[in-house]
Amino acid sequence: MSVIEPGVKVSLHFALKLAGGEIVDSTFDKKPAAFTVGDGNLLAGFENKLIGMHKGERKQFTVTPEEAFGQPNPNNMQHFKRSDFDPAMELHEGLVISFADANKAELPGVVARVDADAVVVDFNHPLAGRVIYFEVEILDVVPA
């Protein structure tokens, strides 16, 4: 029986939940996720929880912010002039806006504050600073 270790291919179902039980993402009712351990598709903090597991195993783990999406960084709060946005745009707290970074890649930001002259946009990952409850069911493990 193959165990999960760096380089193996894994197929699994997962659910990411917050402390209150809110499901952030889940594949349990969809197509399973598949990846190669160490390929960068899954955060190392999540991958490390899978090491040693095998096909058919199901577990739940707690993943700290440091192991997951990190702590919020105050430098990721950016201040814009209200005039930088289309006047017809209805800005409100919680609105997700797509920006382009220096390499023209899409970068989502969440409006944190709006007033007559300024808009503050949070570019931290939405789950930064949050403890994640990670549930997995290993469907298959294929040696490298």
Image (cartoon, rainbow, N blue to C red):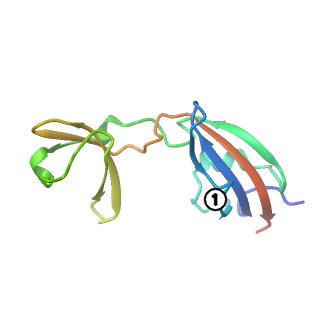
Residue 140 occupies quadrant: bottom right
| Secondary element at image label 1 | loop
Q: Is residue 93 above or below residue 53?
A: above
Residue drawn 32% across the image and 35% down it: 74
Q: Nearer the viewer, residue 16 or 54?
A: 16
Q: Is residue 131 above or below residue 2?
A: above
Q: On the rendered image, what quadrant is the C terminus found in?
A: bottom right
In percent of width and height, residue 134 lies at 65, 42
Q: On the rendered image, what quadrant is the N terminus found in?
A: bottom right
Identify the residue at the far bottom of this view: 144
In percent of width and height, residue 118 lies at 14, 39
Q: Is residue 111 above or below residue 1?
A: above
Which amino acid lies under the numbered mark 1 shown in the image of this protein? Gly
Q: Nearer the viewer, residue 12 or 10?
A: 12
Q: Which residue is mark 1?
A: 38
Residue drawn 78% across the image and 59% down it: 139
Question: Is 82 on the left-hand or right-hand side of 98?
Answer: left
In percent of width and height, residue 20 lies at 57, 30
In percent of width and height, residue 71 lies at 45, 35
Residue drawn 59% across the image and 55% down it: 42
Question: Is 127 on the left-hand or right-hand side of 138?
Answer: left
Give the crowd class for mark 1: few <14, some 14-19, many >=20 residues within 10 Å.
Answer: some
How many marks overall?
1
Identify the residue at the far right of this view: 1
Residue 120 occupies quadrant: top left
Residue drawn 22% across the image and 45% down it: 91
